[in-house]
Amino acid sequence: MIKKLVLTGAAGRLGSYLREPLTQMAEELVSTDITDDIGALYEGETYVKADLSDLAAMTEVLQGADMVVHFGAIGDEAPFDDILQSNIIGAYNVWEAAHRNGVRRVVYASSVHAVGMHRIADNIGLDAPHRPDSYYGLSKCFAEDLGRMYWDKRGVESVHMRIFSCAQVVSPRSLSTWLSYDDLIRLVRAAVSAQTVGCSIVYGISNNDRAPVHNLGAGHIGYKPQDNAEQFAEKILAEAAPADPTDLAQMCIGGPFATIDLGESGVAQLTIIDDSKKT
Amino acid sequence: MIKKLVLTGAAGRLGSYLREPLTQMAEELVSTDITDDIGALYEGETYVKADLSDLAAMTEVLQGADMVVHFGAIGDEAPFDDILQSNIIGAYNVWEAAHRNGVRRVVYASSVHAVGMHRIADNIGLDAPHRPDSYYGLSKCFAEDLGRMYWDKRGVESVHMRIFSCAQVVSPRSLSTWLSYDDLIRLVRAAVSAQTVGCSIVYGISNNDRAPVHNLGAGHIGYKPQDNAEQFAEKILAEAAPADPTDLAQMCIGGPFATIDLGESGVAQLTIIDDSKKT
Amino acid sequence: MIKKLVLTGAAGRLGSYLREPLTQMAEELVSTDITDDIGALYEGETYVKADLSDLAAMTEVLQGADMVVHFGAIGDEAPFDDILQSNIIGAYNVWEAAHRNGVRRVVYASSVHAVGMHRIADNIGLDAPHRPDSYYGLSKCFAEDLGRMYWDKRGVESVHMRIFSCAQVVSPRSLSTWLSYDDLIRLVRAAVSAQTVGCSIVYGISNNDRAPVHNLGAGHIGYKPQDNAEQFAEKILAEAAPADPTDLAQMCIGGPFATIDLGESGVAQLTIIDDSKKT
Amino acid sequence: MIKKLVLTGAAGRLGSYLREPLTQMAEELVSTDITDDIGALYEGETYVKADLSDLAAMTEVLQGADMVVHFGAIGDEAPFDDILQSNIIGAYNVWEAAHRNGVRRVVYASSVHAVGMHRIADNIGLDAPHRPDSYYGLSKCFAEDLGRMYWDKRGVESVHMRIFSCAQVVSPRSLSTWLSYDDLIRLVRAAVSAQTVGCSIVYGISNNDRAPVHNLGAGHIGYKPQDNAEQFAEKILAEAAPADPTDLAQMCIGGPFATIDLGESGVAQLTIIDDSKKT
Amino acid sequence: MIKKLVLTGAAGRLGSYLREPLTQMAEELVSTDITDDIGALYEGETYVKADLSDLAAMTEVLQGADMVVHFGAIGDEAPFDDILQSNIIGAYNVWEAAHRNGVRRVVYASSVHAVGMHRIADNIGLDAPHRPDSYYGLSKCFAEDLGRMYWDKRGVESVHMRIFSCAQVVSPRSLSTWLSYDDLIRLVRAAVSAQTVGCSIVYGISNNDRAPVHNLGAGHIGYKPQDNAEQFAEKILAEAAPADPTDLAQMCIGGPFATIDLGESGVAQLTIIDDSKKT
Amino acid sequence: MIKKLVLTGAAGRLGSYLREPLTQMAEELVSTDITDDIGALYEGETYVKADLSDLAAMTEVLQGADMVVHFGAIGDEAPFDDILQSNIIGAYNVWEAAHRNGVRRVVYASSVHAVGMHRIADNIGLDAPHRPDSYYGLSKCFAEDLGRMYWDKRGVESVHMRIFSCAQVVSPRSLSTWLSYDDLIRLVRAAVSAQTVGCSIVYGISNNDRAPVHNLGAGHIGYKPQDNAEQFAEKILAEAAPADPTDLAQMCIGGPFATIDLGESGVAQLTIIDDSKKT
């Protein structure tokens, strides 16, 4: 069993959902975020307020940790300067702090948007090159390359989970791209418990019939999704407008990000209905 | 829900099996073939007699359609002149008529015989080049390339379903190559309901333990076969003659087509026992 | 030395240029076309008027031949019906006549337009899938697949030479795509003299600095182009309009064919200035 | 049904486990090994004592056989001279005897150690090149290449089953690499009953969540493992020491073989607890 | 001919070498850097002092430009914060300014260090994934991904020239990795004059016998190096210490960067003797 | 400069040709073979009689060596037992002796026959899997895998030179497969002088127009052949019988080895006219 885990972004939409499960995977969970407070703590959890953009602070938070689960970042498209601070500098600080503390592994919330301009009809795997669809996606590319270097040169392992649509299924697109909350937990659990991973990438997507990507070559991570958005298909398709086969936002795996203006925040979020607390 | 679907080859062995399911996928199904009559119609279905080799007629039939499911063609090896008329000119007429009418997608009954000369032991995927085993297979290659061009230049989507052995399992080969009637319907349903497909290829084969090909890269179509010919294995293998490991007809995924003379009709059909109406 | 060669399309723009060189590669050259007369014959050459669309006639012309160099076809985009007659049926007749006569090899004038919708920036090789840009290109795809089948099933070898711009260099595009007349002859000579070829594809392009494709995997053909369009670059670029980086006609290796309407003849020909007779 | 099967290494750890199942796949099973006696015989089984290093003896044993299931060899790392005798010369003798007797197929116990130096994080498939981790693994590479040649030149089929950890699950590594005894039997059964196989390779591994390799491209063998080592994960991981991410023995799919000295016997065996007789 | 070119980093080691050649490729060259002065100007050249980290300034400099040749950045390993300012933010500013001004193409000085951790013995091509060896290399990965996105979403073309050792040949490594000053100019000239490039990558290396990478797939750029470091081999190898086959600094294409500490400046520069002004 | 080189097979057809050039690459050359005497020695050369099948003897010969150039072996097809002794055990002894002495690199005379069953028309590169055509070729596969393991586990570098037809050009096949004696020397020189090679493979073939393989991915070795068998083409083709396109001996890169019986010696040698001493 792992002694100490650190979770960044613990107050975020997805991070908050991971707190309880992670307490079951380690003797000690240190949750961190920039809010003052994240409410009641789970058994084995402590909370430390710290800013990702502060390397010294992050170095302190990661002291003695075995692994860090890094979910702290802006989770949507934003102006470049904002992405730069939270997502690019933030990623550097986490990896550098991990290295300074001898942390074994970074489990990282990468995103489909690192490869979002690839076409659905190409049904890419893990060997497809980066094709970001946004500054947000570009920051994920940066962190993936950063993680590769820290593995190659410093022996810090990383798992880059390219998360798809971890939210309620409300559109035809999410029939393809859904990642259920339970599968998110399965994924993080697998990424933490895999024995050796070097620098690995894995798509964070449920076992959807219509999945627009495949995970061939990530078997060693041991991620086996159990949910399938097809259960919602009949209802959603009945109400959906006909698809436009030449609209990039419908042709690309990044969805609406493929056509939004760079730096224009909030567009994709519109389709997210946060039901994570309902269960 | 789709407003209007057209089904060509509605009187054919496989087409007739699709009529009822397709009525459930669209408000209106127009079935078409060259026979005078296809018997009692399903609710929502109309029948139009039309010749695939007549572009004007096809253009009229496809008027206002959202998609066309194109199964009309000679379904066996035949002299080149016959294949030319029904399968090559026929395919051109369907795509051209689709384009003229703004039809969004052609769902096409391609065939294993487009790649039939590949070896079973190579267990090919969707990226294998064309290797037709017959004029019949060659016409399928033609239509796949035609569909690619109509997508690249005119934005007409297509799904090319390379159908294997959609018939009763009566030989060791069909333990590998079986496509159950139910899986055929699942496949067509998936090809119709997938949101955007560009120009995609998918193998039309059941979930057989011994499948000689794989569908990696077609995940976005959402085809999940449920049947498995292994249920028939014990009985069929007990009665089978020993395999000949260097007989092309047993080594190639096209089966007996790999060794028949070009243009020689009927050979492969001999092993088909049409039980499609039994269920 | 080869005993008997047949050249189809001997009266055509490129075919007429091959007559003299081919007489030097065989004891006997039979030139054939649909015109009554092709002018003065070279030593060792005879002329037979024959229609490619007549299988019996072609079978007679190919009697006793070792190889056929097949250049007879419409050499530009045209309505589908025209392409069907000359290029699709014509190709079938040549291969079938070759088979009936035990002809060892078909050396075929395929075209860049079989893959014309691929992007220049992808710099494709010989393993790229078909992406025709025109009915003309589609007929080349058909003949390539036909040739593959006649090799797989009947042991008729073929070399598919995907000819680029065999004409005067008059545009920025042809700096990339030029095939000099001398290199055309080198190519045909190599395709004829290679010892065994199975079914091989090779790009017919000069040794241009800016070649948009590469011939890796065709080394066994022994084609070594000697000319390079870069000699014309300074003059042509000085007069050229700025490129439009998102115009498909400039992005695709098929050039203007990528954006012409299907079946619309003559567009690409406009840029061809036939200087083949000047030398 | 197969008339006559031969099993080599019938007295070995894995071979002894196969005897009973193989009697159900053939009218006659000839078990062979170098011990005097293998105990009570199953119905349809006979035992012949024979030395793999004796070509004449092996030729006699294989007389009239349809297939041979070749498990006889040193099953662990050993000095080169020992491996040479039992595994290299032994493999030659089996294939040569098979050829002399017209035996249709060799079903061979290859090993993960033929590719043991590949990294877990590369999650290789069947197209990865040989990277042996031991003389033992090197002998498996030899036999795979031998089998390829006997297929290419003499039409003797072979299935090369790269067996992983067919033993009790007692370490974090075997959560990834387990091959249950039942899945071993499923694998051999599939390799024997597949219709035509040419020269095929397949990984012999259970359906483990954490499998470090994948079997894409071996579908035609029809091997569908049913067991999954994940059932043991909680207990084993709770007791396991933290992984060392830069230890080759933990990074490579060959496990401890990746770091043992060549020729040093017994290291890997230490982790094998033979429970094959318990069930 | 191009109307207006902008050169960033015009005062730098490589940039200063490009000024004169670029004046010959455009009617107007605007050189820019952060120094007050770059000495005497060439005919057609103007100089503008501007800071890459100032988006407004860069936007002004690029006004009306057709293309920008972007060489301005820290050209060696440096602390992350420095790389962030000059190389990451600088790249963003250049591409964003290009987009705002409708600049057609960015010709970018990327570096071998974007892929520096790949092994020489793997002899990678252009399809190898990023494996940076330094923060410097990581910033090049960032800019390549940025360029890809600006092409995919905004139609700004880019050529990413991964420059190797553009300096005097003084070590065994540079026999492999040399880019002569003349070939650098040929490369930039090709990248500017290529007709359409989308987002292309090309290795910036001379025609060295021992080149550790190949440029297959970049043919459309038209870069044909003329120099070959082999001319220096005899002298350099005679004086060289024996290679250490397991030293990463000798095994990796990034050379000494493969083993320097991240952020440690100056190591690699030690081997550069700047003879660019001698010619 | 290298201090001490060892050459095995120094009395053999190719080995004897390498003696003089190798003396120029090292301060000391130790030539070794099983004959008593190899005639007059070159300056810097000593001769030691030693048997490759004697590990102790080879260990002594390699004492203090930097590299070994291993050409000692049966150079033709032979019965398995003979190949086993000279080529398989011999290779093991050379690598093991190299390891015991800390020898940095083995430069090995592998052969086209390791991949001889591949088809000419597939024009394979270095990534093609082993397909030996003879016991001779199989022993080359063995040594390549052995060399890979000694690199992976023990840091002994190796270059595997797959030598084609190093003999006079007397047949159409050798127009494709020729390796001139001068190019052989260039190849060995490159393999010795390359800085770091890990475990690399390179085809040993001249710069023939009709080369049936390509060396993409071996650029780091620095082998640049200068000769071209095309100079002999006119004469040889004029006298040659027509090719048989379906004869494996003409279709496969292994040539006549593709159809000889395994173990049948001398067939291929018939076409070798040893003119190596003439020059």
Image (cartoon, coloured by chain):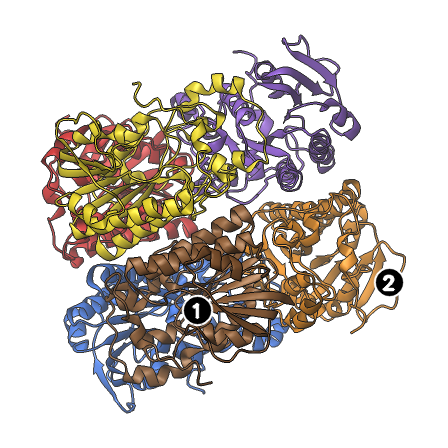
Chain colours: A yellow, B purple, C orange, D red, E brown, F blue
Compared with residue D38, is residue C37 higher up or lower down, i.e. above or below?
Answer: below
Number of other residues with Cα within 10 Å of mark 2, as a class: few under 14, some 14 to 19, many 20 or more = some
Q: Nearer the viewer, mark 2 or mark 1?
A: 2
Considering depth in this image, is D203 or F48 the residue closer to the camera? D203
Compared with residue A183, is residue C97 higher up or lower down, i.e. above or below?
Answer: below
Q: Is residue F131 left or right of residue C213?
A: left
Image quadrant where residue F234 sits: bottom right
Q: In the image, which disc is placed on residue F10?
A: none
Residue drawn at 48 percent across, 42 percent down: A118
Q: Position of residue D136 (x, y in %)?
A: 21, 52
Amino acid tagged 1 = Phe
Q: Residue furthest right?
A: C36
Considering depth in this image, is C14 or E203 the residue closer to the camera? E203
Considering depth in this image, is E3 or B241 the residue closer to the camera? E3
Give SS at disc 2: loop
Q: Is residue C250 left or right of residue F100?
A: right
Image quadrant where residue C17 sits: bottom right
Q: In the image, which disc is placed on residue C38?
A: 2
Quarter the N terminus of chain C occupies: bottom right
| Label 2–label 1 contact, CB within 8 A | no
